[in-house]
Amino acid sequence: MLERAQLQLRGGRFRWLNEQLYTRSGAAAAKLMVAEEGAFAEYHAGFRAQTAGWARQPLDICITWLARCPAAWEVADFGCGDARLAARAAQRVHSFDLVAASPGVVACDVCGGPGAVPLPDGAVQAAVFCLSLMGTDYGRSLQEARRVLAHRGTLWIAEVRSRFEGTAGGVDAFLQALDRAGFQLKARDESDALFAIFRLQRRDGDAPAMVSWPALKACEYKRR
Ligand code: SAH
């Protein structure tokens, strides 16, 4: 009974944190993570428990994709969580998240505007967003990815499909905003029932300063 109650409490706390991260700006999420002791660890325990039941893990798909890319590439992992990508990829991976909970992770708000991610312009050949477009100002992190990406660099995104469902313009509005922000769509994989994967290429030239990004739905995880 006690164990069950504890599990329920933990589940409730995870869902609350999850909702906060999807309904606040990156800056507010960063403050919350500092203010709420243990929040990051609790969030990640819940996130792992939720995604463990999925038939395929988007991060594994990213790892498989990177295994076919040049080992000399440098990669930026935006919202890296426990930095599993850096541990598994042959490339040098720069890992960023709100909290530096694992070795090698640099704590920053990736939505913080130009320079928020401590990498020079054009520093990496790939930028990865694996289930990490969380804040209401998520577009700013994609614009920051464009800054740190080299000429013809690759933007790799995995997102939960339900986040686009019922939103104005659906997935296409999201892809159009990416196009306006200076990313050309190269591949889209919507074969998984739960998540979609997009691969885009950084287009040369100046990105427009203002892009209007569609609001995405919060990802709701089931009660367990
Ligand atoms: N990419 C990892 C973790 C996904 S969970 C994986 O696939 O396993 C989403 C992560 O994005 C969380 O760790 C969360 O803290 C991070 N995140 C959300 N908003 C962020 C922001 N504004 N800046 C940095 N990291 C952010």
Image: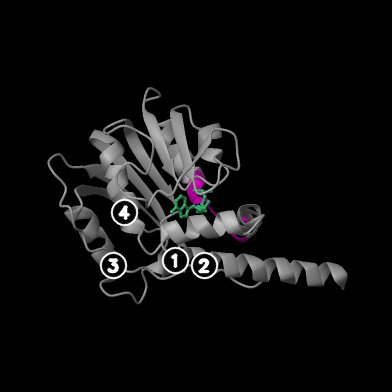
Identify the coloring.
one colour
Q: Please give the name of the residue rendered at 54% of the width and 33% of the height, measured from the top-left corner.
A: 104
Q: Nearer the viewer, residue 66 or 112?
A: 112
**Marks 1 and 3, Cα distance to the nearest angstrom?**
15 Å
Q: Quadrant of residue 174?
A: bottom left
Which numbered disc covers residue 140?
A: 4
The verdict on label 4 being within 8 Å of ligand 1 is no
- Write down the residue under mark 3: 214
Q: Horizontal and vertical percent for residue 139? A: 31, 57
Q: Horizontal and vertical percent for residue 20? A: 51, 67
Q: Nearer the viewer, residue 180 or 20?
A: 20
Residue 189 seen in the current view: yes
Name of the residue lying farthest toward the right: 1
Q: Horizontal and vertical percent for residue 184? A: 20, 48
Q: Amino acid at mark 3?
A: Pro
Q: Amino acid at mark 1?
A: Arg
**Marks 4 and 1, Cα distance to the nearest angstrom?**
13 Å
Q: Please give the name of the residue rendered at 63% of the width and 65% of the height, measured from the top-left corner.
A: 14
- Write down the residue under mark 1: 24
The magenta span reads 50-59
Q: Horizontal and vertical percent for residue 19? A: 52, 69
Find numbered disc 1 in the image and state the secondary structure of the residue it sits on: loop
**Marks 2 and 1, Cα distance to the nearest angstrom?**
6 Å
Residue 54 seen in the current view: no
Q: Quadrant of residue 17?
A: bottom right
Q: Please give the name of the residue rendered at 44% of the width and 42% of the height, measured from the top-left corner.
A: 62
The quarter of the image holding the C terminus is bottom right
Q: Nearer the viewer, mark 3 or mark 4?
A: 4
**Marks 4 and 2, Cα distance to the nearest angstrom?**
18 Å
Which numbered disc covers residue 20?
A: 2
The answer to the question of whether label 2 and label 1 lie on touching residues, with beta carbons closer than 8 A, is yes
